Image (spheres, grey):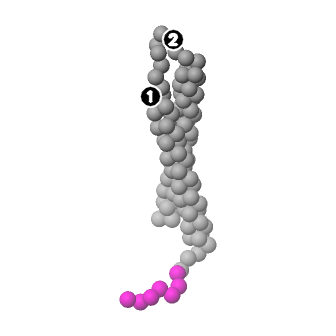
């Protein structure tokens, strides 16, 4: 087997490779953000499930805890959706960059 001593790349090849690397980093950032949002959602859902509320006379503390957990659940859900959009966009751009080269 002959060792590769040089690679025949022009500047457009290098530019495409650089863009794919950037998109890979963006994809990874979106994935990490999604995983963090999912963890926050699980924590908030667990807190809601664990709160014991007397339906006749709920305490102010319990209501506030559930309210805060519901707000966190919604915020984390929005964060998850935003990060999914980042992942989708990065995947589309990587596909487009690779299609340009072929």
Does any portion of residue 49 appear in the rendered image? yes
Check the image and report above or below for 31 versus 79.
below
Q: Nearer the viewer, residue 48 or 73?
A: 48
- Quarter of the figure with the N terminus: bottom left
Q: Which residue position is annotated with label 2?
A: 57
State the residue at coordinates (59%, 66%): 18
x and y percentages locating residue 83 in the rendered image:
54, 44
Q: Residues within 10 Å of mark 2 (few under 14, many from 20)?
A: few
Check the image and report above or below for 21 versus 36.
below
Q: Nearer the viewer, residue 71 or 88?
A: 71
Residue sitting at the far left: 1
Check the image and report above or below for 66 versus 23.
above
Q: Residues within 10 Å of mark 1 (few under 14, many from 20)?
A: few
Q: Are marks 2 and 1 in contact (CB under 8 Å)?
A: no
x and y percentages locating residue 51 in the rendered image:
48, 26
Does any portion of residue 84 appear in the rendered image? no
Q: Nearer the viewer, residue 18 or 32?
A: 32
Q: Which residue position is annotated with label 1?
A: 49
Looking at the rendered image, the disc whose residue lies closer to the viewer, 2 or 1, is 2
Tell me, for residue 92, which label it has, or none. Answer: none
State the residue at coordinates (56%, 58%): 25
Check the image and report above or below for 81 versus 30.
above
Q: Secondary structure at mark 1?
A: helix
x and y percentages locating residue 16 in the rendered image:
57, 65
Range of residues picked out in magenta: 1-7
State the residue at coordinates (53%, 27%): 70
| Quarter residue 79 falls in | top right
Q: CA distance from mark 2 to mark 1?
A: 18 Å
Please check the rendered image and state whether residue 6 is part of the magenta-colored stretch, yes or no. yes
State the residue at coordinates (48%, 56%): 95
Please check the rendered image and state whether residue 87 is part of the magenta-colored stretch, yes or no. no
């Amino acid at each position: 087997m002959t060792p590769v001593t040089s690679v025949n790349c022009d500047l457009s090849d290098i530019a495409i490779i650089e863009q794919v690397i950037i998109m890979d980093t963006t994809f990874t950032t979106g994935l990490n953000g999604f995983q963090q949002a999912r963890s926050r959602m699980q924590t908030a859902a667990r807190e809601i499930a664990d709160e014991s509320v007397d339906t006749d006379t709920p305490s102010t503390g319990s209501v506030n805890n559930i309210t805060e957990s519901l707000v966190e659940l919604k915020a984390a859900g929005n964060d998850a959706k935003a990060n999914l959009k980042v992942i989708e966009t990065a995947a589309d751009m990587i596909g487009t960059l690779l299609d340009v080269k072929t």
